[in-house]
Image: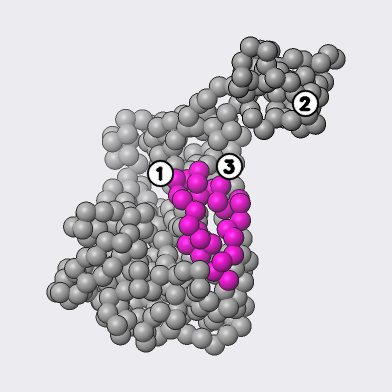
Amino acid sequence: MQFPESWLRSFVDPPLTSGELAHLLTMAGLEVEALEPVAPPMSGVVVAEVLTVDKHPNADKLKLCKVDAGQGEVLAIVCGAPNVAAGMKVPCALVGAELPGVTISAAKVIAREVAALTGAPLRRPEFVPAPVAIADRLPVRIEAPDLCGRFSGRVIRGVNARAATPEWMVRRLERSGQRSISALVDISNYVMLELNRPNHVFDFDKVAGGLEVRWGRKGEQLLLLNEQTIEVDDDVGVIADEAGVESLAGIMGGEATAVDADTTRVYVEAAFWWPQALQGRARRYGFSSEAGHRFERGVDFADTVEGVERVTQLILEICGGAAGPLDDLPVNLPQRTPIRLRPSRARRVLGIDLDAGQIERLLGGLGLALERDGDAFLVTPPSYRFDLAVE
């Protein structure tokens, strides 16, 4: 993945330069492939005023400009811009100016790990639950708890789907490799990147009856948001309504219930999908999605309500509207089994001498709950860590 460093630092801001932070992450096993400044560093560029514009004596398409760049003398500069005119304020590169072009991309960085590595405090977005202003609800039934362990959602009425996405959000999305589409879609994508919380926004008025979370049935078809029509079976999870399949569970929504410029009521959902229920499903159809990529590896099952609240907050701020009650259906959540960790085993595997106090500090910094068990520790993985299972 790629993302702007400024967004990461809004969560955790250690006293390190960009290069030092990238090196620290790489040495910790979170490889930073490259760094790419959004605005390349430059020197020797100033704001100047164009005083006069004349034709170049030896070139038809060039102009000879007299420019005041605050250097104590009027500069003569050759310019090829057809729209240059006297009185304009323009950027002017002085003699010796440096205009480098450097490129940066990043892979795998998580704010929690940065906080643990540096000791810098971790900050999360602050928001309060939206006030319930309407009674609208959408009935949801989970028929496959082995597919979906938790489903949270709410209705928001009176949204302006034509509202413009704020420039700050557009910039963060673009610098994270996401194209701005519309305010509602952008908000959904933004929260996925911000909290690692995939979510989906349905057009409420396009949903027939309620929603049913279940396994597909052979012969059912779905037109996805990527304009691909697929046929599902009983090995593929779906979200359906009375009209048929409306979404490929945890992977991609369907065109039939997609939001558009005329949408006024939406249903925001965030769910916990079991990783094994989604693994390989998108690849069966020859595509992948950001949401599916995350769910296949395990997404925090404790923050579905928080995800819906964050999407709600941004929709109300940007698109307006009134929120209904938030419904939460936890039906089958993972049980976190403590892992017994022996310091002697850690020393043998890592090849470095760590005492019990160091191990306790390191694990605590990663947000792991632990308690002493004789000479060992009982470590309980948090709800967002699916990669911790054995010593």
Q: Which residues fall within the magenta stretch?
A: 160-187
**Helix, strand or loop at mark 2:** strand
Residue 96, placed above or below residue 239: above
Instruction: Please give the name of the residue rendered at 57% of the width and 29% of the height, measured from the top-left corner.
Output: 40
Tell which of 91 and 364 is nearer to you: 91
Q: Identify the residue position indicated by label 1 in the image.
A: 1
Residue 137 in view: yes
Residues marked 1 and 2 touching at CB (< 8 Å): no
Residue 139, placed above or below residue 268: below
Residue 209 falls in which quadrant of the image? bottom left
Instruction: Please give the name of the residue rendered at 83% of the width and 13% of the height, measured from the top-left corner.
Output: 73
Spot occupied by residue 95 in the image (x, y as percentages of width and height): 68, 13
Tell which of 17 and 358 is nearer to you: 17
Tell which of 58 and 70 is nearer to you: 58
Mark 1 Cα-neighbour bin, 10 Å: few <14, some 14–19, many ≥20 = few
Quadrant where the N terminus lies?
Answer: top left
Q: Identify the residue position indicated by label 2 in the image.
A: 50
Q: Identify the residue position indicated by label 3 in the image.
A: 6
Instruction: Please give the name of the residue rendered at 55% of the width and 22% of the height, measured from the top-left corner.
Output: 100
